[in-house]
Amino acid sequence: QVQLVESGGGLVQPGGSLRLSCAASGFTFSSTTMNWYRQAPGKERELVASISSRGGSTNYADSVKGRFTISRNNAQNTVYLQMNSLKPEDTAVYYCNADLWIIGRWNGYWGQGTQVTVSS
């Protein structure tokens, strides 16, 4: 079955860096656009970054442009989110997402999430 397992979250001071990883299995990773979302307390889940199946195209939320970088390793079925110059407003649970066309419709799959806390 489809599995997405995030890791790499934690507590970091403002201005610091973290790298999140998402290990994927159960689908053809190398053919799938991958996304990172985040959800802060009391807020809706928002799309942070996306990367095309071969990594040639990326998109970012305006709030993270120039600070976050999404990348992938198709040989290892893993997608990454490098987060630099972290701010307190980046505090959220970060989720890995894949939308898969299965049985005639799109199905969204999510990891369990990893907590990122930016605080001094």
Image (spheres, helix red, strand yellow):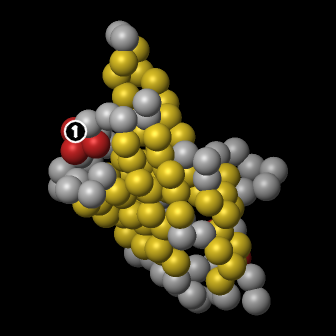
Q: Which residue is mark 1?
A: 31
Q: Residue at x 46, y 24 (%)?
A: 107
Q: Mark 1: which secondary structure?
A: helix
Left or right? Give the position of 21 relative to 114: left
Q: Quadrant of residue 27?
A: top left
Compared to residue 31, the image places residue 62 above or below, namely below
Residue 64 appearing in the image = no
Left or right? Give the position of 91 relative to 66: right
Which percent across, then down, holds residue 104?
A: 35, 10
Q: In front here: 5 or 16?
A: 5
Compared to residue 65, the image places residue 47 above or below, namely above
Residue 25 appearing in the image = yes
Q: Residue at x 41, y 21 (%)?
A: 106
Q: Residue at x 61, y 53 (%)?
A: 113
Left or right? Give the position of 41 relative to 76: right
Which percent across, then down, holds residue 92?
A: 68, 61
Mark 1 residue type: Ser
- The residue lying furthest to the right in this view is 42
Indicate the quadrant containing the C terminus: top left, top right, bottom left or bottom right. bottom right
Left or right? Give the position of 119 relative to 98: right
| Number of marks present in the image shown | 1
Q: Badge 1 local density, few (<14 within 10 Å), some, or many (20+)?
A: few
Indicate the quadrant containing the N terminus: top left, top right, bottom left or bottom right. top left
Q: In front here: 88 or 21?
A: 21
- The residue lying furthest to the top in this view is 104
Q: In front here: 55 or 11?
A: 11
